Image (tube, helix red, strand yellow):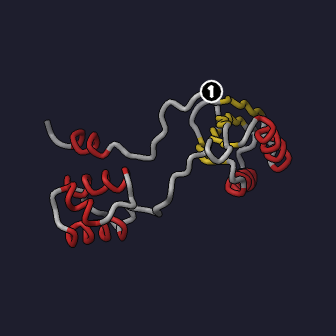
Amino acid sequence: MSVRIDDTDRKILTELQMDASQSLDEIARKIGSSKTPVWNRIRKLRDAGVIGAQTVILDAEALGFEATFFVLIRTSEHDAGWQASFLKTLRDRPEVQEAHRLAGDIDYILKVRVRNARAYDAFYQALIAEVKVFNVTALLSMEEIKSTTMLPLEAASSASEPG
């Protein structure tokens, strides 16, 4: 289902990205509308698949997950069976927060969040025991400078309008 997104929808989506726990009254006040139209638009956006699951963002370090590794994987295997096994392995590993298939020299990049280097090594040993990979390079993030789940909706709005 395709849905047309206007400026009011963008304002609602921006508010929800900042804090989805806001009441309808709060969102309506911030965007200059009333509660019922805001609710109808949210429902429309949810039904169209623009709004997905609503979750809570946890503080990983406060919970003891102090190490983030970016794992670069090269493989000599590209058949469907290997890929299915690899994807299942990634989905079954809660340490893997993100996984991307890439164009270029590296086949995959993973974002892996663990408690420490020993926990990463346990993850690595389990990974290579389950699937054959050609080369694995792990990069430890020394500092997270920016991390967001917010999409730049305002930039998308101005970029798509004729100038």
* Viewport quadrant of the N terminus: bottom left
Residue 27 vertical position relative to residue 39 in the rendered view, above or below: above
Q: From what the image shows, is residue 113 above or below residue 56?
A: above
Q: Position of residue 144 (x, y in %)?
A: 55, 32
Left or right of residue 126: residue 111 = left
Residue 17 x/y as whole percent = 37, 52
What residue is at 61 percent from the left and 44 percent from the top? 62
Q: Is residue 85 above or below residue 53?
A: above
The residue positioned 63% from the left and 38% from the top of the image is 109
Identify residue for label 1.
Answer: 142
Return the x and y of residue 100 as percentages of the image width and height. Answer: 59, 43
Label 1 SS? loop
Q: Residue at (26%, 43%) from the top-left corner?
A: 154
Query: Hey, which quadrant is residue 81 in on the image?
Result: bottom right
Q: Choose between 136 and 9: the one closer to the eye.
A: 9
Count residues near mark 1 (Cα–Cα under 10 Å), then give few for <14, some for 14-19, many for 20+: few
